[in-house]
Amino acid sequence: MRTIDHWIDNDLVPSTSGNTAPVFNPATGEQQAVVGLASVAEVDAAVASAKAAAVEWRKSSLSKRAAIMFKFHQLVEENRDKIAELVSIEHGKVPSDAAGELARGIENIEFACGIPQLLKGGYSEQAATGIDVYNIKQPLGVVAGITPFNFPAMVPMWMFANAIACGNTFVLKPSEKDPSVTLFLAELLKQAGLPDGVFNVVQGDKVAVDRILEHPDISAVSFVGSTPIAKYIYSTGTANGKRVQALGGAKNHMVVLPDADIDMAADAAVSAGYGSAGERCMAISVVVTVGDAHDRLVEAIRDRLPQVKVGPGTDPANDMGPLITAEHRDKVASYLEGAPGEGATVLVDGRTADLPEQGFFLGASLIDDVKPGMRCYEEEIFGPVLSVMRVDTYEEAVDLINRHQYGNGTAIFTRDGGAARQFQFDIQVGMVGINVPIPVPVAYYSFGGWKNSLFGDSNMYGPAGIEFYTRTKTVTSRWPDPSTSSVDLGFPQTR
């Protein structure tokens, strides 16, 4: 059985805790590896490595950091297929989803390559007579990231690319469900010339998470995951004096107005609802139809679902892979089981789809007649289940979304520019798509939701990431006037 280790001081380090967790191939249901779960002492060893490395890495020139990022970018590009294969094997994503994840991660490396420009401060000459004022951005020291299973390559890149480029050292705790990708990225960082200790990986569970949150030498923690855990991460980390950015769950709505291109909207709903088996925080999970758009759109979505081919990620012909574990698959299926009892209508039941006999599969599912208060509406399902709701007016659609506890992403489909502009003004959600179903910002903007989708006030990556991983120091300076100095500095003396 393959064993998955830690990465400390630029080398693989076997776990000594004695605690392990299984790593499955979700497409077959078979255990393919075992991952060692870190003890407190093992987390401390990784942090000690990062702390020691931080002294010299903080002194490194911006050009050196940028050069390493450029080399790392080249190595990731050269190993795209290998990384995507690792994602597919442990997460289950089909090749197109794995490639898409990697592409969005690479964007963040590209952004970090511009670190000399991104760390420029400001300067005010003669703020007062003979006095200049300027500010500089400096790294925090040791920072940490705790990342989810659903994007094992991309989300770590959201964090460590900017953090390292800013001059910090990094400790990553990936999901124990699909941990191998981060070790491969660590190896590529080493090949790119990253010094020992600047990037470390500790495999682990709650023991490792809690030690990261309380460790006195960690200055900041980044997290992406479910809302209950995000709230815990934020409250515990800040109570221990750390900066924390904690992104939580979502229930993303897609509003379809009567004038929308129905085929375009249906294609968008299918790709955004079922891509990556619905296991993404930006998935569309609720379609809100306005007026007479409902029947036309539901029919169009329903007609498309038989074309969604479900199977292992090793087959490029497949459109949707398995869910991450059997337990999670069963939890997602329970929403289909309970929906009729709450008054909803299961139009397409993924449990009865033509699925592989082995593995953690569930077919694309569609629930109609969904209303507020139903479990399938209020909770984050995180699977291939799309709900449809009817409203009569635009105003009702906006009110519905604004009353929901989550405010991560939303979209509107319409041909009316005025309605689209009003929507972006009215809606209380962090990321908005106009005829774009998954409005994930490009790397030179920042990612983050509102309400229970974000704890704290810091978004992820982009300009917000640079701000999060640095602190500003303001310097006020005055120097003696050379013309009045008693030392001959070569300036003409005036009396």
Image (cartoon, rainbow, N blue to C red):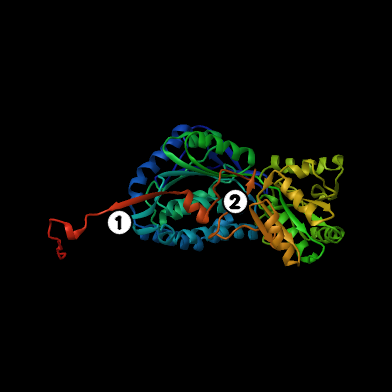
- Left or right position of 132 against 262: left
Packing grade of label 2 (10 A; few <14, some 14-19, many >=20) is: many
In the displayed orientation, state which residue is furthest to the front.
495
Q: Which mark is residue 221?
A: none
Q: Marks 2 and 1: CB-CB under 8 Å? A: no
Dot 1: element: loop
Q: Nearer the viewer, residue 2 or 470?
A: 470
Give the residue type at disc 1: Thr
Give the residue type at disc 2: Gly
Residue that badge 2 annotates? 448
| Residue 36 pos. (x, y %) | 52, 38
Dot 2: element: loop
At a point 52% along the width and 58% down the height, the residue shown is: 108
- Report the Cα–Cα distance between label 2 and label 1: 43 Å
Q: Nearer the viewer, residue 308 or 373?
A: 373
* In the depicted structure, whether residue 67 falls above or below residue 26: below
| Observer able to see residue 379 | yes
At a point 63% along the width and 48% down the height, the residue shown is: 450
| Residue 318 pos. (x, y %) | 71, 59
Toward which corner of the image does residue 118 lie, by quadrant?
bottom left
| Residue 359 pos. (x, y %) | 70, 47
Packing grade of label 1 (10 A; few <14, some 14-19, many >=20) is: few
- Left or right position of 465 against 313: left
| Observer able to see residue 317 | no
Residue that badge 1 annotates? 129
